[in-house]
Image (tube, rainbow, N blue to C red):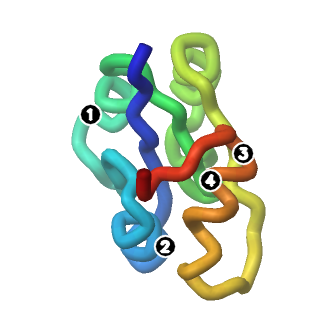
Amino acid sequence: MKHDIVVVGEEDEVVGYRLAGVSKAYTPSTENLKDKLMDGKNIIFITRKAKAALKEDIDEVYRKAIVQEIPEWNKPYGMVAEIIKDTVGFDLRK
């Protein structure tokens, strides 16, 4: 079963994830965000701010998808692929 890696965060946060090879990256202001997150088999990485922006919809997203909150950190974006690999168990670049 194929899963898409999806990241939700502010624009300046998701840029690095796009470069790391995630399938999709959204901001909290993305139109129909809840529907996009629950469309298909997604593994979702979401920032605290983005989670708060989804409000009551976040519970439904948690029930329908695999969701991992992104910890606040100050490492360079080169570490993003390694963080994803450590969390989901596979390398996005392969």
Q: Which residue bears the numbered disc 3?
A: 87
Q: CA distance from mark 2 to mark 3?
A: 18 Å
Within 10 Å of the Cα at label 2, are there few (<14), some (14-19), or many (20+) other Cα atoms?
some
Q: CA distance from mark 4 to mark 1?
A: 25 Å
- Front-most of 46 and 56? 46
* Amino acid, disc 4: Ile
Q: Earlier in the sequence, mark 2 or mark 1?
A: 2
Q: CA distance from mark 2 to mark 4?
A: 14 Å
Q: Which of the numbered marks, if any, corresponds to residue 84?
A: 4
Within 10 Å of the Cα at label 1, are there few (<14), some (14-19), or many (20+) other Cα atoms?
few
In the image, taking residue 77 as reference, residue 71 lies left or right, namely right
Does residue 2 lie above or below 49 as drawn? above
Task: Please tell me whether mark 3 sits on a helix, a strand or a loop.
Answer: helix
Q: CA distance from mark 3 to mark 4?
A: 5 Å
Image-quadrant location for residue 32: top left
x, y percentage for residue 13?
A: 49, 73
Q: Earlier in the sequence, mark 4 or mark 1?
A: 1
In the image, taking residue 78 as reference, residue 38 lies left or right, namely left
Q: Earlier in the sequence, mark 2 or mark 4?
A: 2
Which one is closest to the eye, mark 1 or mark 3?
Answer: 3
* Amino acid, disc 3: Thr
Which one is closest to the eye, mark 2 or mark 4?
Answer: 4
Q: Is there a contact, CB below 8 Å, between mark 2 and mark 3?
A: no
In the image, taking residue 63 as reference, residue 33 lies left or right, namely left
Q: Which of the numbered marks, if any, corresponds to residue 32?
A: 1
- Front-most of 18 and 1? 1
Q: Which residue bears the numbered disc 2?
A: 13
Q: Is there a contact, CB below 8 Å, between mark 2 and mark 4?
A: no
x, y percentage for residue 87?
A: 72, 45
- x 38%, y 74%: residue: 15
In the image, taking residue 11 as reference, residue 75 lies left or right, namely right
